Image: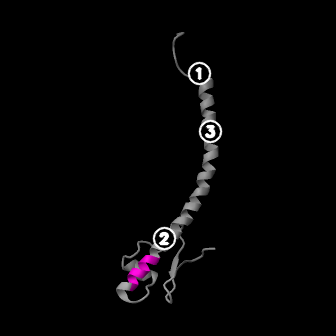
């Protein structure tokens, strides 16, 4: 039994402590970054919708509503990744997020 190799209880506990500390440091950062990524996703969605407004306008010679784009299969969703709705200004085709501060 003298030549048996393996981890002692103390070594295993030390590894568990190190892993726990790393998790405590990483998890809060991941949660904070999630909201940041969703906000950037909404900005990207708005830019995509703006390009679809222009495509619709070229084909139909009028500025569309969000429903026009959705029913015409120009966009697949009427909301941003965070669930905020979008509107299109029928005067100039500008896309805005409703409820964005």
Disc 2 residue crowd, few under 14, some 14–19, many 20+, Cα 10 Å: many
| Residue at the disc numbered 2 | 45
Count neighbours of disc 3 (C-alpha within 10 A) and say few if under 14, some if 14 to 19, many if 20 or more.
Answer: few
Expressed as whole percent of the image width and height from the top left, the position of residue 54 reads: 42, 81
Label 2 element class: helix
Identity of the residue furthest to the top in this view: 2
Q: Which residue is mark 3?
A: 20
Q: Nearer the viewer, mark 1 or mark 2?
A: 2
**67 up-or-down from 47: above or below:** below
Query: In whole angstroms, how far apart are the C-alphas of marks 1 and 2?
Result: 54 Å
Res. 76 image quadrant? bottom left
Mark 1 and mark 3 in contact? Answer it, CB < 8 Å. no
Quarter of the figure with residue 21: top right
Residue 69 percent coordinates (x, y):
41, 80
From the top left corner, tell me how far across and down residue 29 is, in percent. Answer: 62, 52
Q: Residue at x 39, y 82 (%)?
A: 56
Disc 1 packing (10 Å; few <14; some 14–19; many ≥20): few
Q: Which residue is mark 1?
A: 8
Side of 76 where 84 appears, left or right? right
Among the two numbered marks 1 and 3 on one chain, the one whose residue lies closer to the N terminus: 1
Q: Nearer the viewer, mark 2 or mark 3?
A: 2
Q: Which residues are magenta?
A: 50-57
Q: Nearer the viewer, residue 53 or 3?
A: 53
Residue 57: give x, y in percent of width and height. Answer: 40, 85
């Amino acid at each position: 039994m003298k030549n048996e190799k393996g981890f002692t209880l103390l070594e295993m506990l030390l590894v568990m402590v190190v892993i726990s500390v790393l998790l405590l440091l990483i998890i809060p950062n991941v949660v904070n970054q999630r909201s940041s990524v969703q906000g950037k996703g909404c900005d990207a969605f708005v830019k995509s919708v703006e390009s679809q407004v222009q495509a619709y306008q070229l084909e139909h010679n009028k500025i569309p509503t969000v429903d026009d784009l959705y029913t015409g299969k120009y966009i697949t969703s009427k909301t941003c990744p965070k669930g905020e709705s979008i509107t299109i200004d029928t005067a100039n085709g500008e896309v805005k997020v409703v409820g964005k501060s």
